[in-house]
Amino acid sequence: MTNDPQAPGLPGLTGLTFAKGHGTGNDFVIIADPDGLLDMPAGHVAALCDRHRGIGADGLIRAVRSEALAEGRALLAGEPEAQWFMDYRNSDGSVSEMCGNGVRVFVEFLLSRKLISLSIGQTLTIATRGGAKIVLRTAGGYAVDMGPWSFIQPGQADARGMDSLVTAGGLDVARPGISISMGNPHTVVALAHVDELAAADLTKAPLVDPLPKNGTNVELAVPADPLVVDGVGVIAMRVHERGVGETLSCGTGACAAAVATRFWAGATAPDVWRVSVPGGDLGVRFLPGADGTEHVELSGPAVIVATGTIS
């Protein structure tokens, strides 16, 4: 079995059924592998996600029963309801902790395959490498308790609350940023105007100094003026994802942008936010967690657009 993403054909995956789905334009190839039997080398994932030679996607999601994976079994010990594991890979084949938009699409896929039942108003706990996530089905999609947020480099933050400098194409000088963990790493940079946001070149990964230990996703965010409209904070955002490039949306990135902007805005900032990304709008809400920490809830749509068979 070859790992060369340019090699013709994917003999290890021939005949495998798949679905294609997206959440606000953040798109995924999704495969059901309940017993965890598939070999998914990085080259095969990259080939499937290739937009010219493959199906095309920002990432691949494999639906596996938690008991079939070591990571899933470890999580089941404390979260016995998390029966399904979202095995998420970036489009270059690298393994990632989780994906906020992917969580919603993952649950929509499980529903479409009748692997679960979930009515509007009911919740489902799923397992990810970023921990267990509780998903509420809503009339317009899903709301996901993404768990607690935290600063990645708190000891390095300066008086402005910034811990790094970010150099990105199209921006005249390096800009200060702050690094936020949402179970995966993000560095958020505030820009002054939407013209700067439009001018930024995210075809190449921005340089972050110092770079968080496990790398980082980078969000360029523009707070609205006024920042709060009818009690809701408003942000426009673009993102460069590790191992992927610029995407139309990033759920955990939207959460991180709301966390950072709320932190910068101070004590009077609201707990409810709307984050506009190139692929649509996402809702972010801050709520107290049962563990005593502050959690972040992400809401938005999820759509399965196609199904097929790998030839």
Image (cartoon, rainbow, N blue to C red):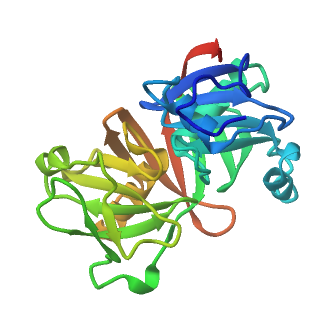
User: Which one is in front, 182 or 202?
Assistant: 202
User: Which one is in front, 69 or 284?
Assistant: 69
Residue 30 placed where, x, y %? 64, 29
Residue 124 placed where, x, y %? 73, 38
Q: Is residue 60 left or right of residue 269?
A: right
Residue 96 placed where, x, y %? 59, 52
* Image quarter in which the C terminus is found: top right
Task: Tally the numbered discs.
Answer: 0
Q: Is residue 112 above or below residue 76?
A: above
Q: Is residue 23 left or right of residue 164?
A: right
Residue 241 placed where, x, y %? 43, 50
Q: Does the image show residue 267? A: no
User: Which one is in front, 295 or 185?
Assistant: 185
Q: Quadrant of residue 130?
A: bottom right
Q: Quadrant of residue 162?
A: bottom left
What residue is shown at x 63% (from left), y 35% (from top)?
44
What residue is shown at x 70% (from left), y 23% (from top)?
111
Q: Is residue 69 left or right of residue 264?
A: right
Q: Is residue 277 above or below residue 233?
A: above
Q: Does the image show residue 58? A: yes
What residue is shown at x 30% (from left), y 46% (from top)?
238
* Image quarter in which the N terminus is found: top right
Q: Is residue 267 above or below residue 90?
A: below
